[in-house]
Amino acid sequence: MSLDTRKAVLSWGLYDWANSAFSTTIMAGFFPVFFKQYWSLGVDPTLSSARLGLANASAGMLVALAAPILGAIADQGGARKKFLAAFAFLGVVMCTGLYWISRGQWTYAVLFYIAATLGFSGANIFYDALLPSVASPRRFDFVSAFGYALGYLGGGLLFAVNVAMTLKPAFFGLPDAAAAIRVSFLTVAVWWAIFSVPVFLFVQEPPQPPPAASGNALRRGWAQLLRTFQELRGAKTIFLFLLAYWFYIDGVYTMIRMAVDYGLSLGLASADLVMALLLTQFVGFPSALAFGVLAQRLDARRVIFICLGVYLCVTLWGAFLKSKNEFYLLAISIGLVQGGIQALSRSFYARLIPPEKSAEYFGFFNLVGKFAAILGPVLIGGAAVGLHALGLGSSLSSRLSILSLALLFIAGGLVFYQVREPGS
């Protein structure tokens, strides 16, 4: 099996281009707003938010619990591409189904969204696990960053078209903005399906020997998972990295998920927040590539520390934002490092794990990711309540509570400092 070929690397990266349409247009963009204003029309906003939160939590929990065992099964049979295809197909079908859900049918919207998120997140386990199949270890950083860069560009391009559809539906032959959003769900499905094809045609998995253990795939996968748990107990480097990753990626994801809410609390219009999201996408494309090149010169570990330093500064800056233009600058700053820290964390981890068990180990990696954005909201909420109880105004306490995210980046950096690549 040849590594580092342009066709294989491009085909692998195009899957990120394909599925990022879901994370931008649906997850971050239209679904939260459309759920409140269309599918949950007339429902108390608090109840609607609770339903949406339950949908996100349910999907995340399903993936987190299933990821390691699914990875172990895929490794046992050399079936990473088969699992990738199955989960991607689930996501595409569910995105298509969102188009057909009528006003007020919030139950169906939640179920389809959970299934689509399950398809998206589940497929990412096996997509990440294919990295050692397309790149040699010396190229992990650049190839991983290349995938994220294509994801930012592809997701941003389709999202820009979808936003234009909602702003000027008549130009696209649509009756109103609601119809435009529903059609946007279809465009995500088509985009995801078409650009997923190359990874199945031109990326080859390494040949796997037939499993020595008897029994069905689930039983063999479960036995392998138990053996890996025992290995992880003695694999200090991998354990420390996953702990560090959990701390700092929690801060990253909390910042992503709280940005819109924080912007609204500052009085910014929803159109301004969409523009900030687009800025992050398009800045993320060249910066992810740049960080991939930089990591080849400095090494990924140092560049991850640079990203953590930028996030720490952004956290301090975010507490004292005063204008829309500052919010845009903050979005650009986040876009500069967001793709870099995600891509280099993936490639750094890929060097630590045995390649023959990549799907299983990336199952643990994704499990940690799914349990991220838990500490951050708790810290922010707890700090805001505590500061308000001390007599500070709600606006000031909300601003100062953002500073609590700095603890996650500091903790992540301190633990990551103890992690060394093999042979370094």
Image (cartoon, rainbow, N blue to C red):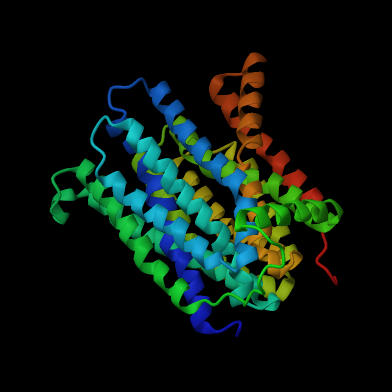
Query: Horizontal and vertical percent for residue 223?
Result: 72, 54
Residue at left 61%, top 75%?
133
| Nearest to the observer: residue 256 or residue 182 | 182
Looking at the rendered image, the quarter that the N terminus falls into is: bottom right
Asked if 139 appears above or below 85 in the picture, the reply is below
Q: Which residue is drawn at 46% across and 56% down?
A: 87
Asked if residue 145 lies left or right of residue 18, the reply is right
Residue drawn at (73%, 70%), measured in percent from left and top?
299
User: Which residue corresponds to the image point at 78% horizontal and 57% vertical from the top-left?
Assistant: 238
Find residue 249 and report its horizontal and vertical position in percent.
Answer: 64, 48
- Residue 86 in picture, x, y percent from top left: 45, 59
Question: For residue 172, what is the image quadrant?
Answer: bottom left
Residue 16 seen anywhere in this rendered image of the structure:
yes
109, 82: nearer the viewer: 82
Percent x, y for residue 388?
62, 18
* Image mark count: 0
